[in-house]
Image (tube, rainbow, N blue to C red):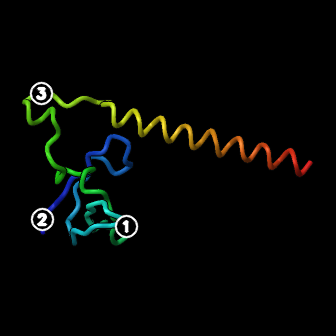
Amino acid sequence: MGWAEIRHPFHPLRGQRFEVLKQRKVVGIDTLLLRQQDRGSVSVAREWTDWADPSAYELLGLAPQRLDVHSLMELVTLLEQLDNHESINKKELKTCI
């Protein structure tokens, strides 16, 4: 099917190219099944690769932004989840003492 490069700024395999084994939808998200030497295969959202639809910046001929609003909102959600998880663990620890 070809090759895909992972481009998501927070992905640990960013910048690496992999052979595409299959394209499929998982929970409504377009994903690519990529052949990885160490693990055999890895599933990655198509939007995180160079197979993604062009961004608004690319369509307008502008340089892509490092942190767009969508990425910042993803980061805020992740930090809130981590903070909530930490608060729950502290409450559980207090009830055990």
- Residue farthest right in this picture: 97
Residue 2 is marked as 2
Figure quadrant of the N terminus: bottom left
Q: Residue at x 39, y 32 (%)?
A: 72
Amino acid at circle 1: Asp
Among the two numbered marks 2 and 3 on one chain, the one whose residue lies closer to the N terminus:
2
Find disc 1 in the rendering and name its residue: 38
- Check disc 3 and report its element: helix, strand or loop: loop
Asked if marks 1 and 2 touch (Cβ < 8 Å), the reply is: no
Where is 42 relative to 63, above or below? below
Where is 92 relative to 61, above or below? below
- Check disc 1 and report its element: helix, strand or loop: loop
Among the two numbered marks 1 and 2 on one chain, the one whose residue lies closer to the N terminus:
2
Q: Residue at x 42, y 40 (%)?
A: 74
Q: Position of residue 22 (x, y in %)?
A: 22, 71
Q: Which of these two is toward me, 78 or 2? A: 78
- Residue farthest front in this picture: 28
- Check disc 2 and report its element: helix, strand or loop: loop
Find disc 3 in the rendering and name its residue: 62
Among the two numbered marks 1 and 3 on one chain, the one whose residue lies closer to the N terminus:
1
What's the distance in space between the residues labelled 1 and 3, CA to CA?
37 Å
Q: Nearer the observer, disc 2 or disc 3?
A: 3
Q: Position of residue 47 (x, y in %)?
A: 25, 51
Q: Residues within 10 Å of mark 3 (few under 14, many from 20)?
A: few
Q: Which of these two is toward me, 55 or 15? A: 55
Left or right of 11: which side holds 92? right
What's the distance in space between the residues labelled 2 and 3, CA to CA?
27 Å
Q: Residues within 10 Å of mark 1 (few under 14, many from 20)?
A: few
